[in-house]
Amino acid sequence: MDQTITILGIESSCDDSAAAVVRREGDARHILSSVVLGQTDLHAQFGGVVPEIAARAHTEKLDHVIEHALTEARVKLTDLDAVAVTAGPGLIGGVMSGVMYAKAIAVGAQLPLIGVNHLAGHALTPRLTDALPYPYLLLLVSGGHCQFLIVQGCDAFDRLGGTIDDSPGEAFDKTARLIGLPQPGGPEVERVAEGADPDRFKFPRPLLDRPGCDMSFSGLKTAVLRARDDCVAANDGLTQQDQADLAAGFQAAVRDVLAEKSRRAIETYLAMKPVKPSFAVAGGVAANMTIRAELECVSANSGVGFTAPPLALCTDNAAMIAWAGLEQFEAGKRDGLDLSPLPRWPLDHRQAPMLGSGRKGAKA
Amino acid sequence: MPSDPTILAFDTSAAHCAAALLSGGRIIASDHVDMPRGQAEALFPLLEGVLGDGGMTWGDLNGVGVGVGPGNFTGIRISVSSARGLALSLGVPAIGVSALEAQAAGIDRVVVSTRAAPRDGLYFQIIGGGETTTPILCDLDTLPPIPARAEPVCIGARARDIAVLCGGTVGHPRYSLTEATARLAAARLHSVTDRPKPLYIRPADAAPARDAGPVLL
């Protein structure tokens, strides 16, 4: 295809207000701009993301972020082919704000509107960065999600398994809080774990004794809490060494679980006899170098190519939304002005829900 | 820009989705649908309907008027995000108008303007006659002093009770919420430069983290 397609992407499903312009020219993919405005400072005193505070910030920041992305990309709204926006899953106040901005831009600039699943954004990122051919195996591992998916197409995902309770990202944040580190916890835990002893504390590797690719991380959080309390009781506080060893032990447990489950997922995937076997990892936790290195190792041992997007495209961003929107635009997807912002929106809608139920529906 | 600008105003700050199109100094089309939820889905189809009824398109607008509350937080954000997005894509100003001001629009007296807040609270503002105050959250027992000599007109939630308390009279808005929003936006089209912001009045419900974390040695 020689046609040039340019898409504006908007993302506001958690605590990052983001906008990006992505262009495809034949086989070449260009991120013309990718602006991410975080809210870490706003949520710092609360020990986690407060939905109402996030929604307030998105509403008053998104237009500035979108203008910045257009300016940096040196494109005008009339140069765009469509506007793509995260329509879920996520914190509904932020998703809603982004969707309304996108609708307003679509009508004002007479552009098609495409509602993108945030998880599809993460899942399709390896196609933006590495032009990975379908089908590939993806481990999506972030603050809100953890699942193995076989990506068959831009709107076709088969879930092999996932967490039955918490996500690893959530567990990293919780561990950081437990051992006195600031939020977001992922990079902090990784930082203090460096050079520490991962074997001093014996943490569980949940569900490794069960077949399949399902995972659990909530018991691991409890184990970290117990070990921390033992340390505090012994010395009336936590020493730097305790803190570092707890972080290292926890990180190693997550690494081992993800590695073993990846091994099993790769087996299932290879049975499909893909032409160019590829294993990709995406989501914020994929930014952890210890985990990344282990997954790369598992991949190499199975003779499967390994792809991990650059860090800035692992964490939340709008370039991935623009790219997913671009692929879906080419596949003919268009949404109406009645597009619904959704708090929950499982990627694989053919399978029975494994997490969440009730009024909001299944989470995964 | 024409002296009688064409303004599309809309509001989703309560259990409704409403819009009015002002052109040539009068409302040429409007719509109001009561709905407890679903404004995010309904707003743009409703706006296109109002524009169509008025024989206009998006490109005909000189500005956008938006209800910024006080009211339902999510509802306010739906409209404010839409208005700011329209300002960006149409290249015209978006003007925020509060519901308390809108209720008092076109009334040449001191107005005590109130709107219902959660848990029997009141959003409260005195408007006009050199007495204009900052909008606040209070309740009937904590009303700020209202100058009786101003012979205020009380409009909005608990207006009857407030009128008794302050020696005022009970009045009614001259315009519908969205007509008032459109008229005030038109009047401010050339003077307002700030982007519209939600008027929450109430802070976000958020408590600082309880688990203080361990003592670090």
Image (cartoon, rainbow, N blue to C red):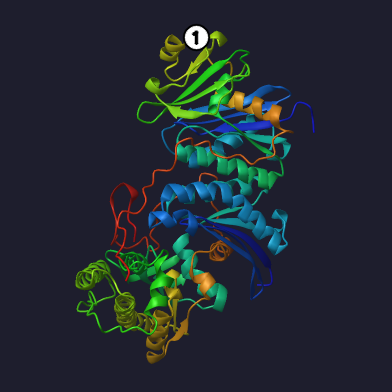
Residue at horizontal 56%, vertical 11%?
A: B150
Horizontal placement of A244 versus B45: left or right?
Answer: left
Pointer 1 residue: B168
Total residue callouts: 1
Quarter of the image for the N terminus of chain B: give it: top right
Q: Nearer the viewer, residue A347 or A292?
A: A292
Horizontal placement of A141 versus B110: left or right?
Answer: left
Q: Which quadrant of the figure has residue A150?
A: bottom left
Q: Which quadrant of the figure has residue A24?
A: bottom right
**A107 lies above or below A207:** above
Residue at horizontal 29%, vertical 60%?
A: A355
Give the structural element (helix, strand or loop) at label 1.
Answer: loop
| Residue B25 place in picture, x, y as percent | 71, 22
| Residue A168 place in picture, x, y as percent | 34, 69
**B11 lies above or below A296:** above
- Camera sees residue B20: yes
- Chain letter of mark 1 equals B
| Residue A335 place in picture, x, y as percent | 53, 51
Q: Nearer the viewer, residue A285 or A119?
A: A285
Q: Amino acid at mark 1?
A: Gly
Q: Nearer the viewer, residue A271 or B11?
A: B11
Quarter of the image for the C terminus of chain B: give it: bottom left
| Residue B194 place in picture, x, y as percent | 66, 40
Residue at horizontal 20%, vertical 73%?
A: A234
Residue at horizontal 71%, vertical 58%?
A: A79
Q: Nearer the viewer, residue A334 or A83?
A: A83
**B116 lies above or below A126:** above
- Camera sees residue A336: no
Q: Residues within 10 Å of mark 1 (few under 14, many from 20)?
A: many
